[in-house]
Image (cartoon, grey):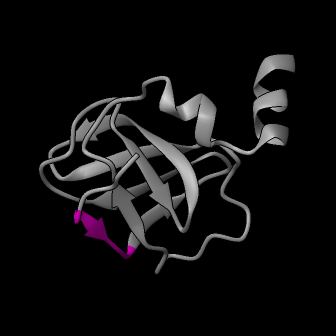
Amino acid sequence: MYFTNKIFTNLERITKSTCVVKATDVGYGELALVDGRPAQVVKIMSEEITLQVFSGTEGLSTDAEVVFSGKPPTSWLVMTLPADFLMLLVYQ
């Protein structure tokens, strides 16, 4: 999976499992990496993009780098996530 050059920083807000970044040209359901952590766009309000960070946001800072994939999830997700994370998804 190749990620695009859509890179943004300066998170507006951080909660337990989500973060908000100001970004443009992003689609609902699009995948992203937040400081290397897999995430997905779950809400778009103008330029405020809310991302669900799959492994949680503990330790993220407001200057975290957000890189968008330009695509919604596909079967590549299963092949690229760490095995322990996939097991967490299966058993929750």
Q: Is residue 42 left or right of residue 89?
A: left
Residue at image location 47% in from the left, 56% down from the top: 33
Towards the viewer: 79 or 62: 79
Residue at (23, 62) in percent of width and height = 6
Q: Residue at x 43, y 24 (%)?
A: 74
Q: Is residue 20 left or right of residue 34?
A: left
Which is more toward the observer, 75 or 28?
75
Image point (69%, 50%), residue name: 56
Magenta stretch holds residue 12: no
Q: Quadrant of residue 31?
A: top left
Q: Position of residue 9 (x, y in %)?
A: 35, 75
Q: Is residue 88 above or below residue 5?
A: above
Question: Dividing the picture into quarters, in which one does residue 27 lie?
Answer: top left
Number of numbered discs on residues: 0
Q: Main secondary structure of the magenta part?
A: loop
**Residue 5 point in image, percent of width and height:** 22, 65
In magenta segment, residue 9: yes
Quadrant of the drawing holding the C terminus: top right
Camera-side residue of 47 and 4 = 4
For residue 42, which quarter of the picture?
A: top left
Tell me where the magenta segment starts and ends, as one range: 5-10
Residue sitting at the far bottom: 63
Vertical side of 61 occupied by 4: above or below: above
9 w.r.t. 12: above or below: below
Q: Position of residue 46 (x, y in %)?
A: 15, 45
Locate residue 10, reporting x and y percent: 38, 76
